[in-house]
Image: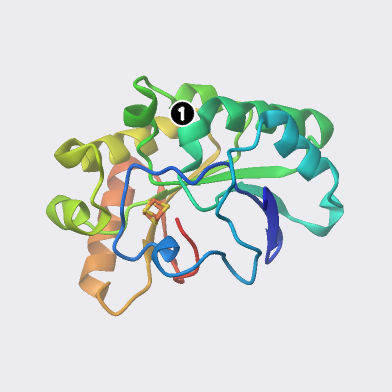
Amino acid sequence: MTITYPLKRGLYVNLTNRCPCRCVFCLRQNGDGVGGSDSLWLEREPTAEEVCASIDARDMSLFDELVFCGYGEPTERLDVLLAVARHVRQKLPACRIRINTNGLSDLINGRPTAPLLEGLIDVVSVSLNTPDPDEYERICRPAFGCQSYDAMLAFAKACRQYVPDVVLTVVDSPVTTPEKQAACRAIADSIGVRLRVRPYEGAQ
Ligand code: SF4
């Protein structure tokens, strides 16, 4: 079972296959890995100890960062994510730690979660996907319904207080017109975070 996998200059952590969204563009619909990885479908969810052991078995000098991003939404396992981040922070204080997320952590966990990231997470990358809440619901199909878009933005905004670098992302695709990208940038500006237009390559 693939708990960690290298991708470019990052070591990626695959905590879960659960996700409250069913994005029409999700890689999981057509594949079983990312960037040539082994299958990211998990036989079962790994414990924090198993995740830490998988990271400890790697030569972290080969990587620029540790990234929580696999075949599911990492904040579905927030307690494990935080325990692993704490372990890595203690062992490798200089290692950059990033979460790629759909931004629905507060709805998933039923409480404000951005404060829990303080001192542990360096970068939170939130999938914005579109400047239009209705389109968001259509393409991401979140289980939480129409409250999801605002909750995602509220989470990103809250993260600013606790995480040094907060990013909203939109996938570069034929349907992401320059106008849509500009509107996404305006949203990012309005909550004081940066926008990244990213190539289509991963589940988040
Ligand atoms: S793209 Fe990300 S948020 Fe969307 S269904 Fe896939 S794992 Fe979930």
- Residue sitting at x 16%, y 58%: 135
- Residue sitting at x 87%, y 52%: 59
> How many residues crowd mark 1 within 10 Å: few (<14), some (14–19), many (20+)?
some
Q: Is residue 42 above or below residue 155?
A: below
Q: Which image quadrant: the C terminus?
A: bottom left
The residue that disc 1 covers is 161
Mark 1 sits near ligand 1, with its Cβ under 8 Å away? no
- Residue sitting at x 38%, y 39%: 156
Residue 40 pos. (x, y %): 58, 56
Instruction: Identify which residue, 78 or 40, lies in the foreground.
Output: 40
Residue 82 pos. (x, y %): 60, 28
Residue type for callout 1: Gln
- Residue sitting at x 79%, y 28%: 90
The reply, left or right, for residue 52 in relation to residue 152 is right
The reply, left or right, for residue 34 in relation to residue 193 is right
Q: Is residue 133 above or below residue 203?
A: above
Residue 43 pos. (x, y %): 59, 46
Which image quadrant is residue 5 in? bottom right
The reply, left or right, for residue 9 in relation to residue 168 is right
Which image quadrant is residue 195 in? bottom left
Q: Is residue 76 above or below residue 187?
A: above
Residue 124 pos. (x, y %): 50, 43
